[in-house]
Amino acid sequence: MADNTLFEFEQTFSRSNVAAYLREIADKLDGEGALEFAAGGETTAVSVPERLQFEVEVEREQNDDGSAEMEIEFELEWHEDENGTRQSTLEIG
């Protein structure tokens, strides 16, 4: 299956700015589920279904110089022809 990247954006922000973006996404997911992303002349919109798979991944990558890079990935995934996946719960503390 070939990937087709519809939108990609990366930039350094303050933790507070990232939190504001995540809150806005959360509000839209809690509403109608319509998300639109725009930056640098690129735009894409998606309609997130009521049920979807949610993945959280925390990684530590050790660099050759002994330093480490931390990464937290949040991933929302669904099949365009389905409206549901298995249920589970996640606690964030």
Image (tube, grey):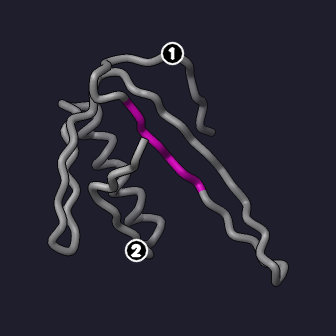
Q: Position of residue 72 (x, y in %)?
A: 58, 54
Describe residue 13's horizontal placement relative to residue 59 as left or right.
left
Q: Kindly identify the residue that appears in the image at 39 percent across and 49 percent down.
A: 3
Can you give x and y, in whole percent of width and height, for residue 4 in the image?
33, 52
Q: Is 21 or 67 nearer to us in this picture?
A: 67
In the rendered view, would you say 23 is above or below 85? below
Q: Residue at x 43, y 41 (%)?
A: 1
Residue 4 is marked as none
Q: Residue 87 at what x, y percent from top left?
A: 51, 15
Image quarter in which the C terminus is found: top right
The image's mark for residue 87 is: 1
Identify which amino acid the numbered label 1 is placed on. Gln
Along the horizontal axis of the image, is 91 left or right of 15? Answer: right
User: Magenta segment: does it hold 61?
Assistant: no
Percent position (x, y) of residue 25? 30, 46
Q: Residue furthest bottom?
A: 65
Q: Residue at x 48, y 33 (%)?
A: 54
Which residue, given by chain and number where applicable, does mark 2 sit on? 11
For the residue labelled by badge 1, is the local secondary structure a helix, a strand or a loop? loop
Callout 2 environment at 10 Å: few (<14), some (14 to 19), or many (20+)? few
The residue stretch that appears in magenta: 72-78
Report helix, strand or loop for mark 2: loop
Q: Are marks 2 and 1 in contact (CB under 8 Å)?
A: no
Outermost residue toward the right in this view = 66
